[in-house]
Amino acid sequence: MLTLHTQRSALSSAITAGILGLVLSGCSPADSTGKVETDAATSLNKVAPGAPGVEPTWAFSGKTGIGTSYEPYLNGQYQDQATNPVSKVWFSVAQGILTETMFGLIHNAQLKELQFIISGNGFVDTEKDNTISTIEYLDTDDQGRPQSLAYKIINKDIEGKYQIEKHIFTDPDRNSLMMNVTFSAFEAGITPHLYVNPHIDNSGANDIAAIEGKALVAHTSDTNSTVMTIKSDVDFVHASAGFVGSSDGIIDLQDNGKLDSLYQTTSNTNQGGNVALTAQYPTLTKANDSLSFNLAIGFAQDKASSLATAQATLDAGYDAVKQAYLGDDKHVGWKDYLASLTPLESMSNNTTDNGKLLYSSALVLKAQEDKTHAGALIASLSNPWGDTVSAKVGSTGYKAVWPRDFYQCAMAFLAMGDTQTPKVAFEYLKKVQVNQKTPVFAGTPGWFLQKTHVDGEIEWVGVQLDQTAMPIMLGWKLWQAGVLTDAEISSWYQDMLKPAADFLVTGGKVKLDWNETNITPPNTQQERWEEQAGFSPSTTAAIIAGLVAASDIATLAKDADASTYLALAQTLQSQLETSMVTTSGLLSATEAAQTEANAAPYYVRISPNGNPNTADKLLDNNGKPGLDQRLILDGGFLELVRYGVVDAQDPVIKNSVMLIDNQQLEDNLRVKYEFTAKDGSKVPGYRRYGNDGYGEDTVTGFSYAENGNTEDQRGRVWPFFTGERGHYELALAKANGSLTPDTKQGLINTYVQGMETFANQGLMLPEQAWDGVGNPTRYNYKMGDGTNSATPLAWTHAEYVKLVRSMTDEQVWDFYPVVKQLAQ
């Protein structure tokens, strides 16, 4: 899919207002250091006016690419050594430009965006707004499958006046990013300008920018600030620092197309703001002229080291850095990691794109691990709806640890043949388990924190029982796969898994931050969407699987509580229909009216009090008023089949599936939508649940919560549900004996291809995809486009990998045979 922006010089209203109101002060001559070239029409002022600039935001969250260097473990950790340096830089690409770029910890953003401003005969363009963008991988095999997270982006002017080609990747030997740029002019007088909006140390409101020598430098007013330096091997003609929306390069260029109001710094008093750096490159004076250069962004804790890092990357050169990133005789790179994943080749035969998305998923999942805290797997390298979210105060967004998303990713690593990463990840989980040493905690320990930074810093404190069960499930899977020995799993059982299992049995009082409650399993304070309390099919599926897994490990460890865990799992299984299945439902799988008297039983999304036949309402959430529990469908009951708790042919499961598939329901309650795959067939997509408000406003087109929560907000289709449904259909075909080579291919064409349909041009899978309901927003979304919520979502890529592995094995990857035995 091409990214097209059709308004030439279309800038935000805030910037336009800034242009009209800007009055520039007189200019003073450059100082004696000669830090930037000047001429009669351009003189260098010392300090830029207009502090603090417009309020900062993050970047568009629908990334078409992410990247970082591959780093091998040493003894299960990332160890920075002279012979094996660890590069701790991550980047993302969206709308054809470099967006959030992190250094240090994976959530520690340093840059909002880096793009080019192009001036010419009668126009000033921004690369993001005025070009048609395409993206592809620089390194592919003979099947076209990605071999590294290095990208080639080509941005063509919408009127054909110029083209920008960029190659982007990081330097595995240094804390730096390299970009190779080629400008091509198709008419005379094209002038490129580099435009950089720093957001140092994860916020954009306290930055200081300066021109120092032939480099652009940014840091904060904090004494411990990270320093970012940008340098290229073609010198800038002019460069300037300014405040966004008042004195930055965009404002300067808009009046006459020239960068002629230059400022050396944004502060000489250590005062920060929302700043930008702009640097002019030589003008392409003739049609068909071109200009090529390498650009490096270096990060460090001081200016000298930051500059030295950027310069060292430039000195190493494009070819050497790119080859090291891919892998060469001195560097273990991305191609070596992929080569170690032996199942990928056979798994590719069970895709419909020859394995392209499978290989990119492997790369994407590994890239979303922190390199200081090995095994810390984040949810997404993005901030949801970032370009409408304030960046005044630091926020991790989705660049954080949720044990639920974490489980999905760890299981995907195992599915594609990586046994090291899930083992290291499993060991990391101890860092986010509540114990008596957890800061300001009181109550019953053993549960796992809702959301944390990768270093374990607590962010959200809700109790989600599936997130306490899943580490047990993961440990059991690693043990069964031989990744953990009997002795190792027994040790981890005593240290981490038994406290979790005990909490699943007894629950108890919890007091942490705002959260003071009493947990009585299986009644969870929050289900997997972190919004409702009660009896949840998906949560209970995990609790049962976790208890059975704990019982099996406890038997190995000769712990008498093995029988307690198993007995409770059996009890919970027997209570499923009384606590989560309504027999007085208000929905029907057909258009015909349905009365409570003849309602077919089905699973509700969640029952607040474990009595699904009442009119109990769910909580108001995401702007939506709570509705009768019997009106809200959620495909989470399929987890009961996935883990082996309930048979795929169970009649209540089948009834519930038919309701999910009812496309005649009103849009607010409807879950299933259809999309067109590359072969022209229809493939399914599913929303989280009816009455979901976690998405764009259907009337105004505003992003989620852009102007506060509204009742017209609507959660869209989440592509990983296509994978969850594919797993169910595979389990059903096995259960009823209908799985043949032809029916299997049908499943692949529908569900594997279905997930592939949602991938963007950079092979990134989104959290949400546009379902066609309501205002298509400022981005003019088409059916199936990933939205601005979060792309790539690790969970979506993990579900795709697991679905392909399941089709390859003809067996659901997340299935637990010991759980299945419970029902027999």
Image (cartoon, helix red, strand yellow):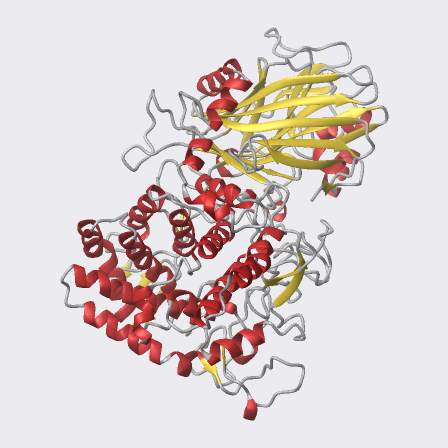
Say if residue 388 shows up in the picture. Answer: yes
**385 lies above or below 116:** below
Q: In the orientation shown, which residue stands out farthest toward the top? A: 32
Where residue 447 sits, quadrant-wise, is bottom left
Residue 453 image offset from top left, x and y in percent: 40, 46
Say if residue 438 shows up in the picture. Answer: no
Residue 285 image offset from top left, x and y in percent: 80, 14
Residue 613 image offset from top left, x and y in percent: 48, 86
Where residue 562 sits, quadrant-wise, is bottom left
Residue 162 image offset from top left, x and y in percent: 77, 26
Task: Name the side, left or right, on which 498 lies relative to 271.
Answer: left
> How many numbered discs?
0
**710 lies above or below 593:** above
Looking at the image, which is closer to me, 690 or 433?
690
Task: Name the side, left or right, on which 673 lies relative to 503.
Answer: right
Task: Name the side, left or right, on which 15 lies relative to 454.
Answer: right
Residue shown at the point (60%, 25%) measured from the top left: 266
Residue shown at the point (55%, 58%) measured from the top left: 745
Where residue 154 sits, quadrant-wise, is top right
Quadrant into which the C terminus falls:
bottom left
**43 lies above or below 389:** above
Quadrant into which the N terminus falls:
top right
Looking at the image, which is closer to me, 824 or 569?
824
Q: In the orientation shown, which residue stands out farthest toward the right? A: 122
Residue shown at the point (57%, 76%) measured from the top left: 658
Q: In the orientation shown, which residue stands out farthest toward the bottom? A: 597
